[in-house]
Image (cartoon, rainbow, N blue to C red):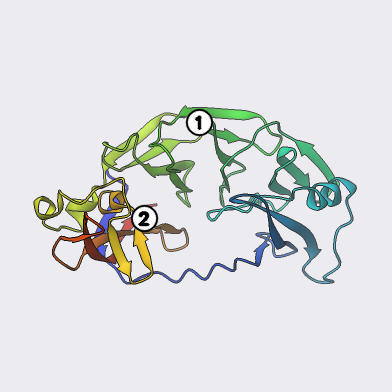
Amino acid sequence: MSFISEVSASAPPTNNVNWDRREFASPDDLWLAVFHDPYEWHMGANGWRLSVLSSKSQFSISNADLERLSKGKGFTCPLDYVPWSTDSKTLALCSWDSGLVFFDTLSNVCQVQKLFPQIIQWSSTFPYLLIFSNGQFTVLDTAGNHLSQTEWKTAAYELPHSGWIKSQNIFFIIGRSSERAKPRITFINAENGKIVYDELIEPEKLVPYDKDEYKSIPRGKYSLILSTSTRLVGSLLDTWNDVIYDQEKGIIFLSVYRPTSKVYKLDGNPVCQVEKKWVSLKMYG
């Protein structure tokens, strides 16, 4: 049975990401993890300072390990980050210096997990943490024990997108295995790592356009003209650009670029003007 109940054209979702300060309230609203003062310690690598505050008193937790890591290269703060466990006791962090760290708010103790994940997402229903590292999705419990592992091949320089089905112990992954492969959505049982459902979600079918007319657009060059000051790589005609998950509503929003002009030459190369188009996937569960 498909986990997708409806596919439709969509307006852009609200996605107000603050690039200077990001706040994550614990599920019980007693704690607030505040990532602030990011700085680029290496090209393309931002380190964030961290403060963990009491929501009532606004006093910050004092912890020597957190302070040391925060003052070093700092913490990562990925876009699809879900740092709090469902019981609000464990904060999952990724330090540039130490990798994955579990911070227990009750004992005020940090535990290093010796992993460096690019994706960190707690389930909102089960005590399971989903991470992606070194081509592998891993599910851990609150003690850091590994429950399941799933090998996941992805196209070069592309990061898969993932999220949890709210009412089930199932997570999904959206991505493609190579630059020639088509994007897929795959649903996986968190406890055993087995695929429970898998299907293509092809941009050319969900957001159709005359693909043959634009086959001359170089996919590996900046051949898409978004504005007079912005050019995009041509492969964004073939794969999803934004993937935004609203877990409360059970909706995945996907964007892709589509031509708004004929192909023409610019600097000797075929190009076309484009705009962003959105669709949404409504899911069961």
Name above or below for residue 18 compared with residue 233: below
State the mark number for residue 136: 1
The amino acid type, in three-letter code, at marker 2 is Asn
User: Is 241 drawn above or below residue 20 in the view shown?
Assistant: above
Q: Is residue 16 left or right of residue 240?
A: right
Residue 143: which quarter of the image? top right
Tell me residue 217's x, y (percent): 20, 51
Residue 232, image x, y percentages: 34, 58
* Mark drawn on residue 276: none
Q: Which of the two residues, 68 or 270, is positioned nearer the viewer here?
A: 270
Q: Position of residue 153 (x, y in %)?
A: 41, 31
Q: Is residue 192 visible?
A: no
Q: Is residue 198 left or right of residue 111?
A: left
Which of pointers 1 and 2 indicates the residue nearer the eye? 2
Inspect this view and state whether residue 59 appears.
Answer: yes
Left/right of residue 230 with respect to residue 129 in the rendered view: left
Left or right of 88? Residue 204 is left
Residue position marked by numbered label 2 in the rendering: 241
**Dot 1: element:** strand
Q: Nearer the viewer, residue 232 or 50?
A: 232
Provide the secondary structure element on which disc 2 rests.
loop
At 14% across and 58% down in the image, what residue appears?
Answer: 209
